[in-house]
Image (spheres, rainbow, N blue to C red):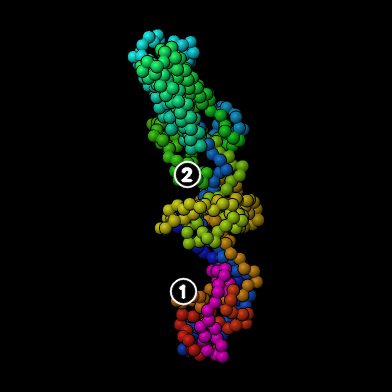
Amino acid sequence: MWPVRRVPVVLSAAVVLLLALTAVSCNDDTADVEVAEVDRADVVETVDAPATVVAAAAATLTAAADGTLAELRVAPGDEVAEGDVLAVIESPGAQRRLQQAEEALAAAEQGTAGGQVDSSGELVAAQRATDDAAGVAFDQAREAAGLIVEPQVRQAMLAQVDAAEQQYLAASRAAQEAVRAVQDGVASLSAAVTALGTAQQLQAQQAYDLAEATVEALTLRAPFDGVVQFGGAARPGAGLEDLLGGAAGQLPPGFADGLPDVAPDDDAGPGVDQSFTVGTPVRAGAAVLTVVDVTELALRAEVDETDVLLVAPDVPAEVELDAAPGAVYQAVVSVVDVLPMPSPRGGVAYGVRLTIADGTLADGRPAPEPKPGMSAIARLRVRQAEDAVAVPAAAVLRIDGADTVWVVRDGRAERTLVTVGAQGPDLVEIRSGLRVGDRVVVRGADLVTEGQQLP
């Protein structure tokens, strides 16, 4: 990203004002000093901020388990609708785990999962075995969830695993209490067996549900309408978080530039198509496809802390893309972030999201449609003063923390405090301290002293 620059911009009326100002030549001692009359003009102040085009949404679909790409129903650039099947992964390991979980569930439902229990010691052993099996199932489920690239999907899966674990722990504690009651001689063996059986059946059901969810996730479906690309977010230069304009987390181990560990031909060399084909091996967590919603593109800008207080929703902006020289796109600020991020030039910056409209080329033709990840400069029009009392920017000096202008009264320079408003590169709005027709020093103001004689 470029360093943030604050560059005020004025309307064409500012140029007219500069041409209209009446310059007065001074004597030889003040040859570098120029005086002009205060007039009115339109002044616009802008803040320039580096920005990136972002998509409304982007979802990377990953392999839920090690396997092979069995079906591929789309090609890069295809438009898809929500729910469309995009690809199917064949995973013998996931199918085997589902079958084992199904058999364990059937045994638990028939009351044979823990075998015949005839003593409190056997109850304790069965309880421990059930807890160990549950722990393995939950660990495997968390490992699989951790490989999901999409943060929201990953968090939803982890939340589901956490909820299932808490439910099992409650049943396990009830079984443990029943076992202790048997050991203390205050409960019958059959009551403890019943409690243990409930815990075993719940553990088996949850293990089956998680295994079934993994198998179902091997069928990759479009989460929303969008355009398909192979692998994860494009590299170099843009990650998924760049496409969305927000943090998307780090790619898990097993990724190289957004593509899976196992490519169709790692040694194919340049010029060889390494896109996915049926039969391609994939590892658990590998990014297979990314669906990008480009129906509503937006812009993500970074505004320095020194300027962000001037930025608010509904502030208009003009946008220029590096990829479309000469094109100008209209935009409007929609959101200003509350929390900061590190600034490239030190200090912090704040994220600003803008909605972006169609652009226009210099000759009036429609500008090309932006693509997610493109770099841009957003010129935020933070303050605008129409028909305002204005002076050239060079006329205003900052002295002892106050804005000052040299006014010529009765032929002598008089320091006058002013209140400034919108600040353009050529003109500055004066809200108080001057009137139209006042004669002020507009060049060489730093050379003037109090009381100096000026024409």
N-terminal of the pair, mark 1 or mark 2, is: 2
177 or 309: nearer the viewer:
177
Task: Identify the residue position indicated by label 1 in the image.
Answer: 401
Tag of residue 247? 2
Give the distance between the C-alpha atoms of the residues marked 1 and 2, in whole angstroms.
40 Å
Q: Amino acid at mark 1?
A: Gly
Question: Are the residues tagged 1 and 2 within 8 Å (C-beta)?
Answer: no
The foreground one among 163 and 428 is 163
Please give the range of residues in magenta. 407-430
Number of callouts: 2
| Residue 170 appearing in the image | yes
Q: Residue at x 44, y 43 (%)?
A: 236
Q: Secondary structure at mark 2?
A: loop
User: Circle 2: is it few (<14), some (14-19), or many (20+) Cα within 10 Å?
Assistant: few
The x, y position of residue 72, in whole percent, is 53, 26
| Most common secondary structure along the magenta stretch | strand
Q: Quadrant of the C terminus?
A: bottom right
